[in-house]
Image (tube, rainbow, N blue to C red):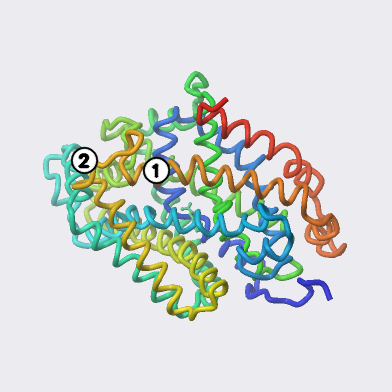
Protein backbone atom coordinates (compact mmCIF):
# COMPACT_ATOMS: atom_id res chain seq x y z
CA UNK A 1 0.00 0.00 0.00
CA UNK A 2 1.41 3.41 -0.91
CA UNK A 3 1.46 5.96 1.86
CA UNK A 4 -1.26 8.00 0.25
CA UNK A 5 -3.46 5.25 -1.04
CA UNK A 6 -5.73 5.55 1.95
CA UNK A 7 -7.91 8.60 1.86
CA UNK A 8 -7.25 11.01 4.71
CA UNK A 9 -8.98 13.75 2.72
CA UNK A 10 -11.55 15.76 4.57
CA UNK A 11 -12.53 17.98 1.70
CA UNK A 12 -15.68 16.79 0.06
CA UNK A 13 -15.83 18.86 -3.11
CA UNK A 14 -13.31 20.22 -5.59
CA UNK A 15 -14.54 23.75 -5.25
CA UNK A 16 -14.58 23.49 -1.45
CA UNK A 17 -10.99 22.34 -1.46
CA UNK A 18 -9.81 25.17 -3.71
CA UNK A 19 -11.76 27.76 -1.73
CA UNK A 20 -10.53 26.44 1.61
CA UNK A 21 -6.91 26.54 0.47
CA UNK A 22 -7.38 29.98 -1.08
CA UNK A 23 -9.21 31.06 2.07
CA UNK A 24 -6.20 30.13 4.13
CA UNK A 25 -3.85 31.93 1.73
CA UNK A 26 -5.95 35.08 1.55
CA UNK A 27 -5.33 37.34 4.49
CA UNK A 28 -3.53 40.48 5.50
CA UNK A 29 -0.89 39.57 2.92
CA UNK A 30 -3.33 40.42 0.12
CA UNK A 31 -5.41 43.17 1.60
CA UNK A 32 -2.87 45.02 3.76
CA UNK A 33 0.71 44.02 2.82
CA UNK A 34 0.38 43.87 -0.98
CA UNK A 35 -0.87 47.48 -1.40
CA UNK A 36 1.74 48.74 1.07
CA UNK A 37 4.61 47.11 -0.83
CA UNK A 38 3.18 48.06 -4.21
CA UNK A 39 2.93 51.66 -3.02
CA UNK A 40 6.50 51.69 -1.76
CA UNK A 41 8.00 49.96 -4.76
CA UNK A 42 6.72 51.73 -7.81
CA UNK A 43 3.18 50.46 -8.46
CA UNK A 44 2.60 48.68 -11.78
CA UNK A 45 6.22 47.59 -12.26
CA UNK A 46 6.07 45.90 -8.86
CA UNK A 47 2.74 44.29 -9.75
CA UNK A 48 4.26 42.78 -12.90
CA UNK A 49 7.25 41.45 -10.97
CA UNK A 50 4.89 40.05 -8.38
CA UNK A 51 2.82 38.19 -10.98
CA UNK A 52 5.99 36.76 -12.58
CA UNK A 53 7.13 35.57 -9.13
CA UNK A 54 3.74 33.95 -8.47
CA UNK A 55 3.82 32.11 -11.81
CA UNK A 56 7.44 31.02 -11.99
CA UNK A 57 8.27 30.57 -8.31
CA UNK A 58 5.14 30.53 -6.15
CA UNK A 59 2.91 28.10 -8.02
CA UNK A 60 5.63 25.46 -8.64
CA UNK A 61 6.66 25.66 -4.96
CA UNK A 62 3.03 25.29 -3.96
CA UNK A 63 2.83 22.13 -6.09
CA UNK A 64 6.06 20.96 -4.41
CA UNK A 65 4.57 21.41 -0.94
CA UNK A 66 1.33 19.75 -2.04
CA UNK A 67 3.28 16.70 -3.24
CA UNK A 68 5.17 16.37 0.03
CA UNK A 69 2.03 16.85 2.14
CA UNK A 70 -0.27 14.52 0.23
CA UNK A 71 2.31 11.81 -0.03
CA UNK A 72 3.49 11.94 3.58
CA UNK A 73 0.02 12.38 5.11
CA UNK A 74 1.27 14.07 8.23
CA UNK A 75 2.10 17.45 9.73
CA UNK A 76 4.78 19.47 7.98
CA UNK A 77 7.71 18.79 10.26
CA UNK A 78 7.10 15.04 10.15
CA UNK A 79 6.31 15.04 6.43
CA UNK A 80 9.86 16.00 5.50
CA UNK A 81 11.52 13.74 8.05
CA UNK A 82 9.41 10.87 6.74
CA UNK A 83 10.63 11.47 3.19
CA UNK A 84 14.35 11.88 3.73
CA UNK A 85 17.24 11.04 6.02
CA UNK A 86 19.23 14.04 4.95
CA UNK A 87 19.94 16.29 7.93
CA UNK A 88 19.17 19.62 6.25
CA UNK A 89 16.13 18.46 4.28
CA UNK A 90 14.69 16.75 7.35
CA UNK A 91 14.58 20.18 8.98
CA UNK A 92 12.78 22.03 6.17
CA UNK A 93 9.46 21.27 7.83
CA UNK A 94 10.66 22.49 11.21
CA UNK A 95 12.00 25.65 9.66
CA UNK A 96 8.57 26.22 8.07
CA UNK A 97 6.90 25.68 11.44
CA UNK A 98 9.23 28.23 13.01
CA UNK A 99 8.61 30.72 10.18
CA UNK A 100 4.84 30.36 10.65
CA UNK A 101 5.18 31.02 14.38
CA UNK A 102 7.49 33.98 13.73
CA UNK A 103 5.05 35.56 11.27
CA UNK A 104 2.14 34.97 13.63
CA UNK A 105 3.91 37.04 16.33
CA UNK A 106 3.59 40.25 14.34
CA UNK A 107 0.59 39.23 12.19
CA UNK A 108 -1.62 39.52 15.26
CA UNK A 109 -0.58 43.15 15.64
CA UNK A 110 -2.15 44.04 12.29
CA UNK A 111 -5.05 41.74 13.21
CA UNK A 112 -5.62 43.93 16.26
CA UNK A 113 -5.86 47.01 14.03
CA UNK A 114 -8.42 45.21 11.85
CA UNK A 115 -10.44 44.32 14.95
CA UNK A 116 -10.36 47.89 16.20
CA UNK A 117 -11.47 49.26 12.83
CA UNK A 118 -14.29 46.74 12.68
CA UNK A 119 -15.52 47.93 16.06
CA UNK A 120 -15.13 51.55 14.92
CA UNK A 121 -17.11 50.81 11.78
CA UNK A 122 -19.93 49.26 13.83
CA UNK A 123 -19.97 52.26 16.14
CA UNK A 124 -20.08 54.56 13.10
CA UNK A 125 -16.93 56.37 14.27
CA UNK A 126 -15.53 57.09 10.81
CA UNK A 127 -18.21 59.57 9.91
CA UNK A 128 -18.03 61.18 13.35
CA UNK A 129 -14.25 61.53 13.12
CA UNK A 130 -14.06 63.97 10.28
CA UNK A 131 -16.97 66.31 9.88
CA UNK A 132 -14.75 68.60 7.82
CA UNK A 133 -13.58 65.85 5.47
CA UNK A 134 -9.95 66.46 6.44
CA UNK A 135 -8.06 63.23 5.62
CA UNK A 136 -5.32 64.05 8.13
CA UNK A 137 -7.78 63.31 10.92
CA UNK A 138 -7.68 59.63 9.91
CA UNK A 139 -3.90 59.58 9.82
CA UNK A 140 -3.77 61.07 13.32
CA UNK A 141 -6.40 58.65 14.57
CA UNK A 142 -4.44 55.67 13.25
CA UNK A 143 -1.18 56.94 14.74
CA UNK A 144 -2.78 57.52 18.10
CA UNK A 145 -4.35 54.09 18.11
CA UNK A 146 -1.26 52.07 17.16
CA UNK A 147 0.93 53.93 19.61
CA UNK A 148 -1.49 53.46 22.50
CA UNK A 149 0.28 51.16 24.98
CA UNK A 150 -2.76 49.09 25.96
CA UNK A 151 -5.58 48.82 23.45
CA UNK A 152 -3.81 47.32 20.40
CA UNK A 153 -1.99 44.89 22.69
CA UNK A 154 -5.26 43.93 24.31
CA UNK A 155 -6.93 43.43 20.92
CA UNK A 156 -3.99 41.36 19.70
CA UNK A 157 -4.38 39.12 22.74
CA UNK A 158 -8.14 38.87 22.15
CA UNK A 159 -7.44 37.87 18.54
CA UNK A 160 -5.01 35.13 19.44
CA UNK A 161 -7.40 33.88 22.12
CA UNK A 162 -10.22 33.60 19.56
CA UNK A 163 -7.94 31.45 17.46
CA UNK A 164 -6.82 29.56 20.58
CA UNK A 165 -10.35 28.37 21.32
CA UNK A 166 -10.96 27.28 17.74
CA UNK A 167 -7.65 25.44 17.55
CA UNK A 168 -8.10 23.67 20.84
CA UNK A 169 -11.20 22.01 19.38
CA UNK A 170 -9.49 21.08 16.13
CA UNK A 171 -9.78 23.12 12.95
CA UNK A 172 -10.50 20.65 10.20
CA UNK A 173 -14.21 20.49 10.83
CA UNK A 174 -15.94 23.46 9.39
CA UNK A 175 -13.06 24.92 7.36
CA UNK A 176 -14.61 23.87 4.07
CA UNK A 177 -18.12 25.01 4.98
CA UNK A 178 -16.82 28.27 6.30
CA UNK A 179 -14.70 28.91 3.20
CA UNK A 180 -17.60 28.16 0.85
CA UNK A 181 -19.64 30.82 2.58
CA UNK A 182 -16.95 33.37 3.25
CA UNK A 183 -15.07 33.44 -0.03
CA UNK A 184 -18.04 34.36 -2.23
CA UNK A 185 -18.97 37.01 0.34
CA UNK A 186 -15.44 38.40 0.25
CA UNK A 187 -15.58 38.57 -3.55
CA UNK A 188 -18.92 40.31 -3.65
CA UNK A 189 -17.91 42.97 -1.12
CA UNK A 190 -14.61 43.51 -2.88
CA UNK A 191 -16.36 43.76 -6.22
CA UNK A 192 -18.75 46.40 -4.87
CA UNK A 193 -15.77 48.37 -3.56
CA UNK A 194 -13.87 47.93 -6.84
CA UNK A 195 -16.79 49.30 -8.86
CA UNK A 196 -17.21 52.09 -6.39
CA UNK A 197 -13.52 53.00 -6.52
CA UNK A 198 -13.79 53.59 -10.30
CA UNK A 199 -16.01 56.56 -9.51
CA UNK A 200 -13.82 58.24 -6.89
CA UNK A 201 -11.80 61.40 -7.56
CA UNK A 202 -8.50 59.57 -7.40
CA UNK A 203 -9.59 56.74 -9.75
CA UNK A 204 -7.55 57.89 -12.75
CA UNK A 205 -4.33 58.46 -10.85
CA UNK A 206 -4.79 55.42 -8.64
CA UNK A 207 -5.42 53.03 -11.51
CA UNK A 208 -2.61 54.38 -13.62
CA UNK A 209 -0.26 54.00 -10.64
CA UNK A 210 -1.32 50.37 -10.34
CA UNK A 211 -1.36 49.51 -14.04
CA UNK A 212 1.15 51.80 -15.84
CA UNK A 213 4.62 50.44 -15.17
CA UNK A 214 7.68 52.57 -14.48
CA UNK A 215 10.57 50.12 -14.59
CA UNK A 216 13.13 52.66 -13.41
CA UNK A 217 12.02 51.87 -9.86
CA UNK A 218 13.10 48.23 -10.08
CA UNK A 219 16.34 46.85 -8.68
CA UNK A 220 17.37 43.59 -7.02
CA UNK A 221 15.98 44.55 -3.65
CA UNK A 222 12.58 45.24 -5.29
CA UNK A 223 12.67 41.82 -6.93
CA UNK A 224 13.47 40.25 -3.55
CA UNK A 225 10.52 42.09 -2.00
CA UNK A 226 8.18 40.92 -4.80
CA UNK A 227 9.40 37.35 -4.38
CA UNK A 228 9.02 37.46 -0.59
CA UNK A 229 5.52 38.87 -0.99
CA UNK A 230 4.54 36.14 -3.47
CA UNK A 231 5.67 33.49 -0.94
CA UNK A 232 4.00 35.32 1.92
CA UNK A 233 0.69 35.72 0.16
CA UNK A 234 0.58 32.16 -1.17
CA UNK A 235 1.64 30.85 2.28
CA UNK A 236 4.73 29.19 0.81
CA UNK A 237 7.36 27.75 3.18
CA UNK A 238 5.25 28.22 6.31
CA UNK A 239 4.24 24.65 6.85
CA UNK A 240 0.63 25.33 6.04
CA UNK A 241 0.16 24.16 2.44
CA UNK A 242 1.81 20.87 3.20
CA UNK A 243 -0.60 20.24 6.08
CA UNK A 244 -3.59 21.22 3.93
CA UNK A 245 -2.46 18.87 1.17
CA UNK A 246 -2.46 15.99 3.62
CA UNK A 247 -6.26 16.41 3.68
CA UNK A 248 -6.56 16.39 -0.12
CA UNK A 249 -8.22 13.44 -1.84
CA UNK A 250 -6.18 11.18 -4.05
CA UNK A 251 -8.18 12.44 -7.04
CA UNK A 252 -7.13 16.06 -6.48
CA UNK A 253 -5.18 17.45 -9.42
CA UNK A 254 -2.32 19.20 -7.61
CA UNK A 255 -1.09 21.38 -10.49
CA UNK A 256 -4.58 22.53 -11.36
CA UNK A 257 -5.40 23.27 -7.72
CA UNK A 258 -2.19 25.30 -7.28
CA UNK A 259 -3.02 27.36 -10.38
CA UNK A 260 -6.54 28.07 -9.17
CA UNK A 261 -5.40 29.01 -5.66
CA UNK A 262 -2.63 31.21 -7.10
CA UNK A 263 -5.09 32.92 -9.44
CA UNK A 264 -7.69 33.60 -6.74
CA UNK A 265 -5.05 34.87 -4.32
CA UNK A 266 -3.54 37.20 -6.94
CA UNK A 267 -6.96 38.43 -8.02
CA UNK A 268 -7.80 39.39 -4.44
CA UNK A 269 -4.47 41.24 -4.12
CA UNK A 270 -5.10 43.16 -7.35
CA UNK A 271 -8.65 43.96 -6.27
CA UNK A 272 -7.27 45.36 -3.01
CA UNK A 273 -4.92 47.52 -5.06
CA UNK A 274 -7.84 48.76 -7.18
CA UNK A 275 -9.76 49.62 -4.04
CA UNK A 276 -6.91 51.24 -2.17
CA UNK A 277 -4.90 53.32 -4.66
CA UNK A 278 -7.78 55.45 -5.94
CA UNK A 279 -8.62 56.03 -2.26
CA UNK A 280 -5.04 57.05 -1.52
CA UNK A 281 -5.02 59.54 -4.38
CA UNK A 282 -8.49 60.86 -3.51
CA UNK A 283 -7.29 61.63 0.01
CA UNK A 284 -3.95 63.01 -1.25
CA UNK A 285 -1.85 60.65 0.81
CA UNK A 286 1.56 59.45 -0.33
CA UNK A 287 1.33 56.01 -1.97
CA UNK A 288 4.37 55.04 0.06
CA UNK A 289 2.87 55.95 3.41
CA UNK A 290 3.39 52.37 4.54
CA UNK A 291 1.66 50.13 7.01
CA UNK A 292 -1.38 52.30 7.18
CA UNK A 293 -3.02 52.46 3.74
CA UNK A 294 -5.97 50.22 4.57
CA UNK A 295 -6.44 51.96 7.87
CA UNK A 296 -6.15 55.59 6.78
CA UNK A 297 -7.11 56.00 3.16
CA UNK A 298 -10.09 53.64 3.22
CA UNK A 299 -12.03 54.98 6.21
CA UNK A 300 -11.56 58.43 4.75
CA UNK A 301 -13.05 57.30 1.45
CA UNK A 302 -15.90 55.47 3.12
CA UNK A 303 -16.80 58.62 4.95
CA UNK A 304 -16.31 61.02 2.02
CA UNK A 305 -17.93 59.07 -0.70
CA UNK A 306 -20.92 58.01 1.25
CA UNK A 307 -21.53 61.36 2.89
CA UNK A 308 -24.73 61.57 0.88
CA UNK A 309 -25.64 57.95 1.41
CA UNK A 310 -24.87 57.44 5.09
CA UNK A 311 -26.60 54.09 5.46
CA UNK A 312 -24.87 52.56 2.47
CA UNK A 313 -21.54 54.01 3.66
CA UNK A 314 -22.08 52.56 7.11
CA UNK A 315 -23.02 49.14 5.74
CA UNK A 316 -20.07 48.91 3.35
CA UNK A 317 -17.52 49.98 5.95
CA UNK A 318 -18.87 47.48 8.49
CA UNK A 319 -18.86 44.72 5.88
CA UNK A 320 -15.36 45.53 4.66
CA UNK A 321 -13.79 45.45 8.10
CA UNK A 322 -15.85 42.42 9.04
CA UNK A 323 -14.42 40.57 6.06
CA UNK A 324 -10.93 41.81 6.88
CA UNK A 325 -11.32 40.41 10.40
CA UNK A 326 -12.66 37.11 9.04
CA UNK A 327 -9.93 36.73 6.40
CA UNK A 328 -7.38 37.56 9.08
CA UNK A 329 -8.86 35.18 11.61
CA UNK A 330 -8.75 32.25 9.18
CA UNK A 331 -5.10 33.02 8.46
CA UNK A 332 -4.30 33.36 12.16
CA UNK A 333 -5.98 30.01 12.81
CA UNK A 334 -3.97 28.32 10.03
CA UNK A 335 -0.75 29.90 11.28
CA UNK A 336 -1.55 28.95 14.87
CA UNK A 337 -2.36 25.37 13.93
CA UNK A 338 1.03 24.61 12.38
CA UNK A 339 3.27 25.00 15.49
CA UNK A 340 0.47 23.64 17.68
CA UNK A 341 0.23 20.39 15.72
CA UNK A 342 4.01 20.12 15.61
CA UNK A 343 4.50 20.57 19.38
CA UNK A 344 1.69 18.14 20.22
CA UNK A 345 2.97 15.40 17.92
CA UNK A 346 6.68 15.94 18.41
CA UNK A 347 6.76 16.24 22.18
CA UNK A 348 3.76 13.98 22.65
CA UNK A 349 1.91 16.52 24.74
CA UNK A 350 -1.81 17.18 24.77
CA UNK A 351 -3.30 19.49 22.18
CA UNK A 352 -4.49 21.76 24.95
CA UNK A 353 -0.98 22.16 26.27
CA UNK A 354 0.64 22.72 22.87
CA UNK A 355 -2.00 25.32 21.93
CA UNK A 356 -1.39 27.10 25.24
CA UNK A 357 2.38 27.17 24.71
CA UNK A 358 1.97 28.71 21.25
CA UNK A 359 -0.64 31.19 22.50
CA UNK A 360 1.50 32.38 25.41
CA UNK A 361 4.70 32.78 23.38
CA UNK A 362 2.85 34.61 20.61
CA UNK A 363 1.16 36.87 23.19
CA UNK A 364 4.51 37.83 24.70
CA UNK A 365 6.41 38.50 21.46
CA UNK A 366 3.29 39.92 19.77
CA UNK A 367 2.84 42.43 22.63
CA UNK A 368 6.43 43.58 22.17
CA UNK A 369 5.85 44.01 18.42
CA UNK A 370 2.68 45.94 19.15
CA UNK A 371 4.42 48.19 21.66
CA UNK A 372 7.20 48.83 19.14
CA UNK A 373 4.72 51.05 17.28
CA UNK A 374 4.53 53.31 20.32
CA UNK A 375 6.29 53.17 23.67
CA UNK A 376 9.02 50.80 22.44
CA UNK A 377 9.58 52.60 19.14
CA UNK A 378 13.03 53.69 20.35
CA UNK A 379 14.13 50.08 20.36
CA UNK A 380 15.49 49.62 16.84
CA UNK A 381 17.70 47.06 15.18
CA UNK A 382 19.20 48.02 11.80
CA UNK A 383 17.01 51.13 11.87
CA UNK A 384 13.83 49.08 12.12
CA UNK A 385 11.47 48.81 15.05
CA UNK A 386 10.53 45.33 16.18
CA UNK A 387 7.36 45.17 14.08
CA UNK A 388 9.15 46.18 10.85
CA UNK A 389 12.04 43.89 11.70
CA UNK A 390 9.75 40.87 12.04
CA UNK A 391 8.06 41.74 8.76
CA UNK A 392 11.39 42.20 7.00
CA UNK A 393 13.06 39.04 8.34
CA UNK A 394 10.08 36.84 7.59
CA UNK A 395 9.42 38.16 4.08
CA UNK A 396 12.92 38.87 2.86
CA UNK A 397 14.95 36.21 4.69
CA UNK A 398 13.02 33.22 6.06
CA UNK A 399 10.57 32.73 3.19
CA UNK A 400 13.21 32.88 0.41
CA UNK A 401 15.46 30.44 2.34
CA UNK A 402 12.48 28.12 2.89
CA UNK A 403 11.58 28.36 -0.82
CA UNK A 404 15.12 27.52 -1.94
CA UNK A 405 15.28 24.49 0.38
CA UNK A 406 11.88 23.16 -0.72
CA UNK A 407 12.79 23.48 -4.42
CA UNK A 408 16.14 21.73 -3.94
CA UNK A 409 14.55 18.99 -1.89
CA UNK A 410 11.67 18.29 -4.28
CA UNK A 411 13.77 18.79 -7.43
CA UNK A 412 16.83 16.80 -6.41
CA UNK A 413 16.17 14.59 -3.46
CA UNK A 414 12.56 13.43 -3.55
CA UNK A 415 11.93 10.04 -5.15
CA UNK A 416 11.03 10.47 -8.85
CA UNK A 417 8.30 7.83 -8.63
CA UNK A 418 6.63 9.71 -5.80
CA UNK A 419 6.72 12.91 -7.86
CA UNK A 420 5.28 11.26 -10.92
CA UNK A 421 2.59 9.48 -8.87
CA UNK A 422 1.63 12.72 -7.16
CA UNK A 423 1.48 14.71 -10.39
CA UNK A 424 -0.48 12.12 -12.34
CA UNK A 425 -2.50 10.68 -9.45
CA UNK A 426 -0.95 7.25 -10.10
CA UNK A 427 -1.34 7.55 -13.84
CA UNK A 428 -5.04 8.31 -13.74
CA UNK A 429 -4.70 11.87 -15.07
CA UNK A 430 -2.34 13.26 -17.72
CA UNK A 431 -0.66 15.59 -15.20
CA UNK A 432 -0.70 18.60 -17.49
CA UNK A 433 2.00 21.12 -16.65
CA UNK A 434 4.11 18.59 -14.73
CA UNK A 435 7.21 18.85 -16.95
CA UNK A 436 7.64 22.63 -16.64
CA UNK A 437 6.83 22.49 -12.92
CA UNK A 438 9.53 19.86 -12.31
CA UNK A 439 12.01 21.81 -14.45
CA UNK A 440 11.29 25.02 -12.53
CA UNK A 441 11.66 23.26 -9.19
CA UNK A 442 14.85 21.52 -10.16
CA UNK A 443 16.85 24.20 -11.96
CA UNK A 444 15.18 27.56 -12.23
CA UNK A 445 13.92 28.18 -8.67
CA UNK A 446 17.05 27.15 -6.73
CA UNK A 447 19.33 29.26 -8.95
CA UNK A 448 17.10 32.29 -9.47
CA UNK A 449 15.80 32.45 -5.91
CA UNK A 450 19.33 32.21 -4.49
CA UNK A 451 20.56 34.96 -6.83
CA UNK A 452 17.64 37.26 -6.03
CA UNK A 453 18.01 36.54 -2.32
CA UNK A 454 21.74 37.29 -2.17
CA UNK A 455 21.65 40.33 -4.45
CA UNK A 456 18.53 41.70 -2.79
CA UNK A 457 20.35 41.66 0.54
CA UNK A 458 23.40 43.23 -1.11
CA UNK A 459 25.58 40.18 -0.47
CA UNK A 460 26.57 39.71 -4.13
N1 LIG B 1 -0.91 33.91 3.17
C1 LIG B 1 -1.49 34.59 4.28
C2 LIG B 1 -1.67 36.05 3.95
O1 LIG B 1 -1.53 36.43 2.83
C3 LIG B 1 -0.66 34.39 5.51
C4 LIG B 1 -0.71 32.98 5.95
C5 LIG B 1 0.40 32.19 5.94
C6 LIG B 1 -1.87 32.41 6.33
C7 LIG B 1 0.36 30.87 6.30
C8 LIG B 1 -1.93 31.10 6.71
C9 LIG B 1 -0.82 30.33 6.68
O2 LIG B 1 -1.97 36.84 4.78
Residue 285, image x and y in percent?
Answer: 28, 32
Q: Which residue was labeled with disc 2?
A: 139
How many labels were placed on the picture? 2
Give residue 275's mark.
Answer: 1
Q: Residue at x 62, y 66 (%)?
A: 17
- Residue 429 picture quarter: bottom right
Front residue (pair 71, 273): 71
Q: Residue at x 79, y 74 (%)?
A: 5
Q: Residue at x 52, y 24 (%)?
A: 219
Q: Quadrant of the C terminus?
A: top right
> Tag 1: Cα neighbours inside 10 Å, few (<14), some, or many (≥20)?
many
- The single residue placed furthest to the right in the displayed view is 427
Relative placement, left or right, of 156 versus 21 is left
Relative placement, left or right, of 327 versus 241 is left
Relative placement, left or right, of 125 versus 273 is left
Q: Earlier in the sequence, mark 1 or mark 2?
A: 2
Front residue (pair 44, 236): 236
> Tag 2: Cα neighbours inside 10 Å, few (<14), some, or many (≥20)?
some
Front residue (pair 284, 372): 372
Q: Is residue 315 visible?
A: no
Amino acid sequence: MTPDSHNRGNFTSKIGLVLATAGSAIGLGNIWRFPVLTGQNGGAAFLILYIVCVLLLGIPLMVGEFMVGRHAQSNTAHAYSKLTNHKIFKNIGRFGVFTGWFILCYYIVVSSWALDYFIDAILGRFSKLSQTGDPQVYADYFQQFVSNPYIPTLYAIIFILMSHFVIIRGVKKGIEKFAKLMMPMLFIIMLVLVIFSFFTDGAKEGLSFLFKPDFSKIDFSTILIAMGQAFYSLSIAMGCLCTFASYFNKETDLVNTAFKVGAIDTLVAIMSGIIIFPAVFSAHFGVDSGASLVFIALPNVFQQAFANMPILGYAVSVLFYFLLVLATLTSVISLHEVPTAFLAEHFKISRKRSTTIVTITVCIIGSLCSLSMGSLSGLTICDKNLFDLFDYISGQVFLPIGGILIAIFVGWSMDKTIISNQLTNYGTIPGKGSTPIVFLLKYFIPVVTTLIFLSGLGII
